[in-house]
Image: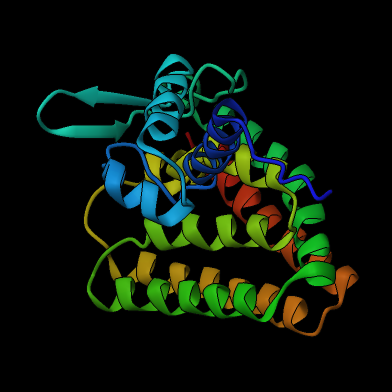
Amino acid sequence: MNEVVRRRPRGLAHDLVDTLGGRVRDGSLAPGEKLPTEAAIMEEFGVSRTVVREAISRLQAAGLVATRHGVGTFVVGMGDATTFRITPDKLGTLQDVIAVLELRIGVETESAALAASRRTPENLATLRHALQAFISALEEGRDAVGPDFQFHLEIAKATQNHHFVDLMATLGGMMIPRARLEPGPLTPERQAYLRRVNAEHENIVDAISRQDPEAARAAMRTHLANSRERRKRLAEQR
């Protein structure tokens, strides 16, 4: 006699929490962004309204989302599960920024190497899109902080290891030094500097494209070390 095993609603809700929570952590659902409607979630995942509501309740309890009655449910942050955070008050000085760059050198060099080993064609396409977005921002006179962060986040995604993605998501755009240290209009000198930054990005993507972990590791280390040394020179001038 064949038996049909049905998933219990609580198990389905748990799976849905994992999936939606993962989208928040990897940046697919950004802070301030509205979640899809209950009906849309039901259709995408093939679950009941009861399962959707239980999952959203759990996400609320975890501090990931908040519901505004009559408006919808919105992403509010990374939730209580994320204990490691670098808040703006911890990036108040050049030395603070240099310390974060040292952390990034330790993490992102290995991230780049893993990305070279594991990247998919889709990962490579998104990395190249981030390169183009960086150039487009410069041509429009913008500082390209968003595309810069997105580039590094896409490398984390290409590792196929969500812990790298989670760490990058906790840092956010603050991890880009000029986001804190160099506000103001984009001068010709800064534009030339940012073009050099994107050339370093291209070297990283080339190594990842060739699936050469050692070259990717070296290219990322060079890129972040150059940024660190630039900040050290600024610190010495002050």
Q: Residue at x 62, y 22 (%)?
A: 84
Residue 89 located left or right of residue 235:
left
Q: Nearer the viewer, residue 24 or 192?
A: 24
The colour scheme of the drawn protein is: rainbow
Q: How many marks?
A: 0
**Above or below, 4 relative to 139:** above
Query: To which quarter of the image does residue 194 belong?
Result: bottom left
**Residue drawn at point x = 27 percent, y = 37 percent:** 32
Where residue 163 sits in the image (x, y, percent)?
71, 40
Image vertical order of residue 237 relative to residue 114, above or below: above
Is residue 10 or residue 77 the one in the foreground? Answer: 10
* Residue 21: image location, x then y, percent: 52, 36
Q: Position of residue 142 (x, y in %)?
A: 26, 64
Name the residue rendered at 39%, 28% in the picture.
56
Q: Quadrant of residue 217?
A: bottom right
Q: Position of residue 220 (x, y in %)?
A: 72, 62
